[in-house]
Image (cartoon, helix red, strand yellow):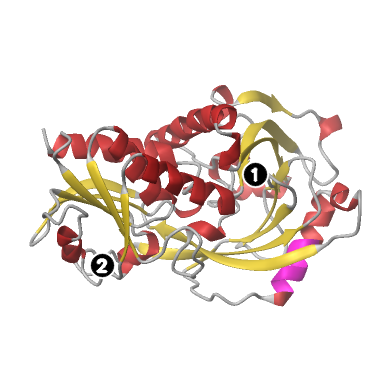
Amino acid sequence: MSSKKIVVIGAGVAGLTSALLLARKGYDVTIVAKFAPGDYDIEYTSPWAGANWMSFVKNNQQLAKYDEITYCVFQKLVKEFPEAGLWPRRCITYVREKDLAKQSDLLGGLLDAKPWFADTVENFTELDKSQIPSGYVQGIAYDSFCINVQIYLPWLQSQCFAAGITLKLYTLKHIKEACNLHSSGEPADLIVNCTGLMASKLGGVMDPKVYPGRGQTVLVRNHAPAMYNDSGTDDADDELTYIMSRPGGGSILGGCYQKGNWNPTVDPNMADRIVKRALKLCPGLERDFPLDIVRHNVGLRPGREGGPRVELETISEVGKVVHNYGAGGAGYQSSYGMAEHVVQLVDLAFA
């Protein structure tokens, strides 16, 4: 197996995690990417994420399995690698009565009084009325994780380097170019495509189902006592309210999920709405000092109609390709589950 040469395209969370698990399985892996940890570009989606584990899967066993596997890995990472930028945090969701009726596509299973992951996460609790703020009719709380991606992505890259993986910076126009970019100088035996949003533009792939899910957030120095989100807002159907208290201090306030919107520019009016909603949801943000804004962020989640694509394909002039893209807002919380599926498909390709 060790002689099999694999090129992984992409150095976001999907590409790095897939490459790492493949190398640990004994494959000879080279990562080829336009961007790498430390870079910031609207096309490079991973550095802009919040990020946390908050599964919104509903009635999809495969996606639930991805999230379950990743939750278990995160539990291990928190204990064994405190330098990785993951932090255990309580996650609290409040639901409005009007949102129960419409069953939001964005929040899916989080609107259930007992979502699929109730038996997976630690210390799951259905909140009673005394624990639910005015304006809400239902709530859950459970032990979860928040990720500081500015720490986690470089750490994940360092794990790849320690596993013997080589990284090449290169802008691909067609997936077939990757075949000749393995660090050995020999042709790759298989390509793993983790190009995220760029799967819609990469020659040989050009997936028309891929779309951006624009997100806008506000990073503040104030530290929330937990992670919070609620079921909806009266501002707009594509706007959300969530708070992620980060490892190392500060909190991320969000947000929105604007499907098909490629605009990288901060909307100041939306920023004001985000701040207003966050302070209403968690007045304790200003417990120690008035809200102190670090910066405003815009990122594009790599969504895909019908859900993520994790499958084996044979492409003319390329050969065997395993795809892993389209996770949308679940890129981090499903990363290890999707990468394990990639390893299974690679093993199958060489069986």
Which disc number belongs to residue 206?
2
Quadrant of residue 228 within the rendered picture:
top right
Q: Residues within 10 Å of mark 1 (few under 14, many from 20)?
A: some
Work out whether 218 lies above or below 3.
below
Given residues 35 and 303, the one toward you in this image is: 35
Visible residue check, residue 307:
no
Q: Which residue is mark 1?
A: 100
The C terminus is located in which quarter? top left
Q: In the rendered structure, which disc, 2 or 1, sits on the residue that comes first in sequence?
A: 1
* Front-lying residue, 189 or 321: 189
Residue 273 lies in the magenta stretch: yes
Q: What is the span of residues highlighted in magenta in the rendered image?
A: 269-275
Query: Is the C-beta separation of discs 2 and 1 under 8 Å?
Result: no
Mark count: 2
Position above or below: 71 against 210? above
Q: Which mark is residue 260?
A: none
